[in-house]
């Protein structure tokens, strides 16, 4: 039995009432069993049987959800800057992904997970590359993260290197195998997400069969859509329709479908996505880096779309830091809408917690601090120089917090970060492996 008392923090619950209160949080066998004012006698009993963590000067929050990331790309950090989306893919990302072997992919996943968990991330939705995807799940299991992942599916497309292009049959067969092996693994912490990369690299047959398979297996579907104007124009030239309409026609829609970006969405498309229950993930830093634009997140939310938040990949962001994305999301919404209150701090924090959990279909388990939910929790300092002398706790988190403020992180009640250091992935080992494998990877890729 495991028992923890997180004592004396500011509890930012993200519950339906959005309560913020001073008090304690009790975790027993992976579940939140009490929060708020815990009676003295109960506290003494917990001290005798479990562990007390001092949270004075800290906010205690739900673990952060990153609903769109690419663990396979972490080793490419700094190797693909100053390019728009389609040249970025063809000149850098696809050749680098094609050069991955099992060792480099393992190093990439470990680096990304170590960085994200150290910053308070407890749940992810990841899109891999085409090959070796068991390795990503192995590292996710090792790390203790809660998450979904799937191999990238690519059976067509101009500029796709030989090392990534698959037959439709082999892409589907390998995805089905991975789903059978990993969906529900690690005591339910891991799940599968079918991941057709985007319309320009996937045939209609592949998309339709993915939709059918995901519904049969109760798995997620994860793809990119409405990201960049050039991408959208290329889709329309090929299909005679916009990507959102095509995805719906193929069956990639509804609550199991998670679409990354949505920068180019029209108001009409937002309403249609909301009616279908299709989810969108906002990746503000990646959208800025690739000059994709600024997504209309407040308009999506007003239309009823469930919107999550994600860092995307290291080569289109340079950080896998949820705090950067939180701040960017809140500030860019103000600029995009020309309204200083367009996305208040509490709403921005929802993107990375309870709404991110809703996007992944796990909000009945995580995303808020409520008795009965699983204990995915982060303890974050809000009393350092860049936070003081005070003010609203949620504003401090969204506008001032940085990754190094995170003290402790729990996933399913298990401590995965202690005093700012990951416990399951050792920092120095992760860095050594990343540096070694990145050099080998670049040689294999033969970038021009």
Image: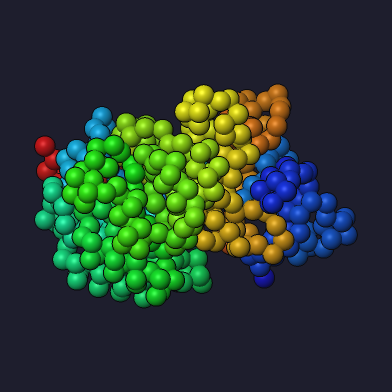
Asked whether residue 48 appears in the rendered view, the answer is: yes
Residue 412 picture quarter: bottom right
> Is 380 on the left-hand or right-hand side of 74?
right
Query: In the picture shown, does residue 244 fall above or below 252?
Result: above
Report x, y in % for residue 100. 22, 54
Query: In the picture shown, does residue 276 fall above or below 316?
Result: below
Decide which of 385, 90 is in the foreground and name it: 90
Report x, y in % for residue 207. 28, 62
Decide which of 335, 397 is in the foreground and name it: 335
Report x, y in % for residue 140. 42, 60
Q: Residue at x 72, y 61 (%)?
A: 371
Task: Assign the C terminus to one quadrant of the image.
Answer: top left
Residue 162 picture quarter: bottom left
Decide which of 40, 327 is in the foreground and name it: 327
Decide which of 326, 250 is in the foreground and name it: 250
Task: Assign the N terminus to one quadrant of the image.
Answer: bottom right
Q: Residue at x 61, y 35 (%)?
A: 345
Query: In the picture shown, does residue 201 fall above or below 293?
Result: below
> Is 434 on the left-hand or right-hand side of 217?
left
> Is 151 on the left-hand or right-hand side of 445?
right
Query: What count of labels does the image hold?
Result: 0
> Is 439 on the left-hand or right-hand side of 366?
left
């Amino acid at each position: 039995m495991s028992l923890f008392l997180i004592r004396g923090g500011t509890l930012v619950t993200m519950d339906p009432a959005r309560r913020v209160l001073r008090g304690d949080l009790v975790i027993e066998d992976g579940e939140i069993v009490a929060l708020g004012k815990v009676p003295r006698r109960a506290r003494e009993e917990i001290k005798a049987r479990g562990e007390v963590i001092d949270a004075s000067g800290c906010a205690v929050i739900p673990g952060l959800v990153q609903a769109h990331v690419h663990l396979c790309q972490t080793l490419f950090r700094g190797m693909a800057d100053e390019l728009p989306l389609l040249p970025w893919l063809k000149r850098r990302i696809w050749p680098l992904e094609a050069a991955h072997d099992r060792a480099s992919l393992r190093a990439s996943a470990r680096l990304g997970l170590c960085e994200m968990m150290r910053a308070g991330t407890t749940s992810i939705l990841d899109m891999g590359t085409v090959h070796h995807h068991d390795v990503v799940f192995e590292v996710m299991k090792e790390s203790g993260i809660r998450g979904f992942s799937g191999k990238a599916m690519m059976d067509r497309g101009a500029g796709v290197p030989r090392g990534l292009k698959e037959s439709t049959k082999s892409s589907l067969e390998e995805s089905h195998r991975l789903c059978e092996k990993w969906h529900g693994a690690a005591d339910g912490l891991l799940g599968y997400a079918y991941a057709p990369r985007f319309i320009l690299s996937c045939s209609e047959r592949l998309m339709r069969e993915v939709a059918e398979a995901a519904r049969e297996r109760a798995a997620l579907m994860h793809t990119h859509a409405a990201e960049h104007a050039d991408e959208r124009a290329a889709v329309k030239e090929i299909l005679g329709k916009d990507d959102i309409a095509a995805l719906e026609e193929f069956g990639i829609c509804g609550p199991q479908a998670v679409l990354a970006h949505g920068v180019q969405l029209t108001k009409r498309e937002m309403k249609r996505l909301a009616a279908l229950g299709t989810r969108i993930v906002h990746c503000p830093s990646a959208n800025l880096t690739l000059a994709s634009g600024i997504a209309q997140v407040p308009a999506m939310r007003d239309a009823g779309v469930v919107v999550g938040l994600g860092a995307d990949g290291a080569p289109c962001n340079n950080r896998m830091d949820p705090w950067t994305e939180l701040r960017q999301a809140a500030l860019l919404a103000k600029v995009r809408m020309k309204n200083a209150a367009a996305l208040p701090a509490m709403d921005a924090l929802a993107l990375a917690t309870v709404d991110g959990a809703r996007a992944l279909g796990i909000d009945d388990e995580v995303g808020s601090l409520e008795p009965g939910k699983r204990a995915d929790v982060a303890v974050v300092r809000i009393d350092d120089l860049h936070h003081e002398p005070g003010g609203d706790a949620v504003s401090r988190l969204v506008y001032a917090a940085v990754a190094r403020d995170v003290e402790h992180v729990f996933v399913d009640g298990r401590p995965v970060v202690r005093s700012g250091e990951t416990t399951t992935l050792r920092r120095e080992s992760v860095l050594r492996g990343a540096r070694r494998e990145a050099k080998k990877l670049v040689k294999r890729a033969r970038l021009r």
